[in-house]
């Protein structure tokens, strides 16, 4: 039996498809596999690597489908959709229509996934008369079961007989601006819960830079890396980094490079991960970027400086974070005085703590800078959570070396 596995990618995501393909092939040694890749653009270098892939693995065939013009004819995705989402997400809807007519079962996978075990069970599952199988989404309600569209098992002939590609695309065209989840919203609107519910073990959802979500069960078959941070994003927890980059190094895309986090939440968790591993310079960089962005946001929002109007009311020469020139000048007299046993005090306001971080970073005292930037970030995060202003955590952030 041939395993037919499909992806939908744009040019930037071809390398991640290549790593996942490598992972799948090495997890299924000797298994005949056909990869079906619907593309919204593709770099020539990646085309060459796909060709080399089939030479390296003789049990593999790759079918490429150029769908750029097809996507050009559709509405743009919602202007309110998350920045990580792109129109190539719609390509999964077209895959059952693209593949050869002899294909009966097709597994679609988002390319931000990784197999821990073989997928054999999926080619034996009874589809129970359903055109598609998927894991259940957290958006499900008592009235309607919703699917997570990142992992789909198609009964291709039945899907095509029911004209579901046409129906889902028609729905998207009608409501595109309202569909923040793009293809997932369109699928759930059309299917109305009529899909085979697959076990979560086939698509176990984790945030790669959030240690609280890294709790992988022994029965997990595949990991699905959700939200903005991915295994190729700096700040990824070591467990995920190690297993993912093992396959990167074995792939034809071994020259792939890590990327910086691009939003506040991802940068904050990158700081947490770096701090846990005592990489204080990296922790300082990420916490500092978060502290600066949240401070900017607060000032823009409140038209005032953060939690106080006068730095001189909060920071003194005996406060940690004092700039070196003032520290030396003042403490020269402390040491000459009868109060030479006086000790430095910690800053007590958000503004003073933030400025202490700036001072310590300038001195390259990264462990202390990390402490102050981290405290500033955590307090501001608490502040915005209290006010239900969660949108700030998805604000774009700029990292500088």
Image (cartoon, rainbow, N blue to C red):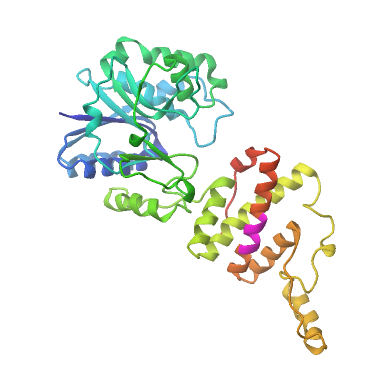
Residue at 72% of width from left, 70% of height from top? 320
Q: In this view of the protein, which residue sits in the foreground, 386 or 87?
A: 386
In percent of width and height, residue 147 lies at 42, 25
Residue at 41% of width from left, 47% of height from top? 215
User: Does the magenta-highlighted stretch encompass residue 373?
Assistant: yes
In percent of width and height, residue 313 lies at 85, 63
In percent of width and height, residue 185 lies at 48, 22
Q: Is residue 392 left or right of residue 236?
A: right
In percent of width and height, residue 322 lies at 74, 71
Q: In this view of the protein, which residue sits in the foreground, 93 or 243?
A: 243
Query: Can I make out residue 77 in this image?
Result: yes
Q: Is residue 95 left or right of residue 12?
A: left
Q: In this view of the protein, which residue sits in the foreground, 166 or 211?
A: 211
Q: Main secondary structure of the magenta part?
A: helix
Q: Give the vertical position of 59 relative to 368 (above or below).
A: above
Q: Which residues are magenta?
A: 371-376
Q: Give the vertical position of 268 relative to 348 (above or below).
A: above
Q: Give the vertical position of 373 relative to 165 (above or below).
A: below
Residue at 21% of width from left, 26% of height from top? 124
User: Does the magenta-highlighted stretch encompass residue 3?
Assistant: no
Q: Give the vertical position of 285 relative to 382 (above or below).
A: below
Q: In this view of the protein, which residue sits in the foreground, 117 or 160?
A: 117
| Screen quadrant of the N terminus | top left
Query: Can I make out residue 62 in this image?
Result: no
């Amino acid at each position: 039996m041939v395993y037919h596995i499909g992806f939908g990618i744009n040019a930037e995501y071809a390398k991640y498809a290549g790593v996942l393909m490598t992972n799948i092939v090495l997890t299924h040694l000797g298994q005949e596999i056909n990869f079906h890749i619907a593309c919204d653009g593709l770099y020539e270098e990646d085309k060459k690597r796909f060709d080399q892939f089939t030479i390296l693995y003789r049990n593999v065939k790759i079918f490429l489908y150029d769908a750029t013009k097809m996507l050009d004819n559709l509405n743009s995705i919602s202007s309110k959709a998350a920045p990580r989402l792109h129109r190539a997400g719609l390509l999964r809807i077209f895959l059952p229509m693209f593949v050869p007519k002899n294909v009966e079962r097709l597994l679609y996978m988002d390319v931000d996934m990784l197999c821990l075990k073989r997928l054999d069970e999926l080619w034996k599952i009874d589809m129970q008369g359903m055109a598609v199988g998927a894991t259940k989404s957290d958006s499900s309600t008592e009235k309607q079961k919703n699917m997570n569209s990142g992992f789909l098992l198609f009964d291709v002939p039945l899907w095509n007989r029911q004209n579901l590609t046409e129906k889902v695309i028609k729905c998207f065209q009608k409501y595109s601006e309202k569909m923040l989840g793009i293809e997932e919203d369109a699928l759930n609107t059309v299917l109305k819960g009529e899909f085979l519910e697959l076990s979560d073990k086939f698509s176990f959802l984790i945030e790669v830079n959030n240690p609280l979500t890294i709790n992988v069960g022994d029965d997990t078959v595949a990991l699905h890396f959700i939200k903005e941070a991915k295994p190729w994003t700096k700040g990824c927890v070591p467990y995920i980094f190690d297993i993912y980059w093992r396959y990167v190094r074995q792939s034809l895309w071994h020259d792939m490079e890590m990327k910086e986090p691009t939003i506040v939440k991802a940068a904050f968790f990158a700081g947490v991960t770096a701090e846990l591993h005592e990489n204080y310079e990296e922790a300082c960089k990420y916490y500092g970027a978060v502290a600066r962005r949240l401070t900017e946001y607060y000032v823009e929002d409140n038209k005032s400086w953060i939690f106080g109007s006068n730095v001189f009311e909060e920071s003194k020469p005996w406060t940690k974070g004092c700039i070196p020139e003032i520290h030396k000048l003042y403490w020269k007299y402390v040491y000459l005085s009868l109060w030479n046993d006086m000790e430095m005090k910690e800053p007590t306001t958000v503004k003073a703590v933030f400025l202490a971080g700036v001072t310590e970073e300038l001195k390259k005292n990264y462990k202390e800078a990390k402490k102050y930037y981290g405290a500033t970030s955590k307090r501001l995060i608490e502040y915005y959570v209290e006010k239900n202003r969660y949108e700030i955590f998805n604000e774009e952030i700029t990292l500088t070396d």
